[in-house]
Image: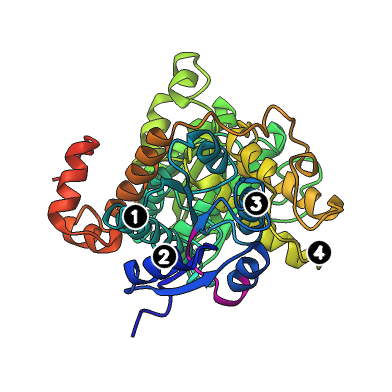
Amino acid sequence: MTEQGKRLLIVEDDPGLQSQLRWCFEDYEAVVAEDRETALAQLRRYEPPVVLQDLGLPPDPEGVGEGLATLEEIMALAPETKVIVVTGHGDQENALKAVGLGAYDFYEKPVDTETLQLIVDRAYQIHALERENVRLLRQDSTSPLDGIIASSEKMLEVCRMVEKVAPTNATTLLTGESGTGKELLARALHSLSTRVDKPLVAINCAAIPESLLESELFGHERGAFTGAIKQTRGKVEMADGGTLFLDEVGDMPLALQAKLLRFLQERVIERVGGREEISVDVRVVCATNQNLEVAIREKRFRQDLYYRISEITIDIPPLREREGGRVILARTLLEKFGAQQGRLLKGFGADALNAIQNYAWPGNVREMENKIKGAVIMAEGKQISAADLGLSAVDAQAPNLNLREVRRLSETGAIKGALVYASGNISKAAKMLGITRPTLYDLLDKYEIRTQK
């Protein structure tokens, strides 16, 4: 019996070559189609991870028009599918055109079975790794890291740091550009801590006027100032036993920074207008989009406070640096907003996917959320286009593809991802990649990938 998920769709109109390919891939559950209509029907029915497709299909077996049209429809229906196109000898121009439309790889006739087996096996391995990645991200909807799409190596490292730091009481500083998900990670730090049954209290230091911020943080006594008609607890007291999240801490006024430093050193506060010292047990998490070292040099932030709040610093990468993560995040958001708006959309068009990859996303995840939510509401077709996202034609241009470079980037990305998941364990990483330890060592040498000792 073959593995249920190890299916291969062979799109070929030559009966002799069909038989040869069936024999070549006897370890797969091979499904055959001879034209576009049959291929799309088999794709919907069996959902094969890998498709092996000839470009010359009826009614145009001597040309490539029908084959390219079939490829486009396959990628629209199942964008995660790895399509390997088989072309005539020397037909590299059309092969590269197919790769530009979304094909994973190409192979020239005449067929050498061993080489073709290697290409198909590797395509299947990469597809399996990508699916495992998505499964791990979605497997527990109640996970404290739910909503954090960590498909890039940098974000995986961030999540691993959060998991290590959360059970401790270390004061933690989250740094990163606006919109990168600092508040989401702060909530994860609380949810994974021993303080999860106590409150998480957040305050945005940039959103409250300076004259009110001290009272918001530390509370005030009745009569402390005009309008103070009763005793009021501050955010620090309200967080007793739990976690205090100070967002945009880099915008805190200098005078208040001194009082925050005293609290962090002694864990006692005094309400505004009061003289009683109140002991408070809180875990403090801070966040900022500013470079605090620059702020220290410019005398806008206290150096001693910086050392207190940065016992552990977690730097969150901007969206443009999350290689491989932008499209996965976009698809997750499309699924989320599509369900919210009651719209059944069939993913992103090729121009939208290219735009998502090429656009710099200066507003990071928050900007992507806004664009995709708007596109879900306004899109007139079944697929989201670059225009629906409000991205320009320049952003939607397909990248200049060099097949060797694409293959190198794909393999190195898969290897690095597997090593992160396996915490550097070579045996586990090799198993995830579906290769042997010696083969993985050869690939590490080939791509000069260093592993942590």
- Residue behind mark 2: 132
What's the distance in space between the residues labelled 2 and 1, CA to CA?
24 Å
Badge 4 amino acid: Gln
Is the N terminus in the top left, top right, bottom left or bottom right quadrant?
bottom left
Q: Earlier in the sequence, mark 2 or mark 4?
A: 2
What's the distance in space between the residues labelled 1 and 4, CA to CA?
44 Å
Badge 3 amino acid: Glu
Question: Is residue 107 positioned above or below 447 on the image?
Answer: below
- Residue behind mark 3: 72
The image quadrant that residue 345 belongs to is bottom right
Secondary structure at numbered mark 3? helix
Q: Earlier in the sequence, mark 1 or mark 3?
A: 3
- Residue behind mark 1: 116
Q: Earlier in the sequence, mark 4 or mark 3?
A: 3
Residues in magenta? 44-52
- Residue 46: in magenta span: yes
Question: Is residue 342 positioned above or below 232 on the image?
Answer: below
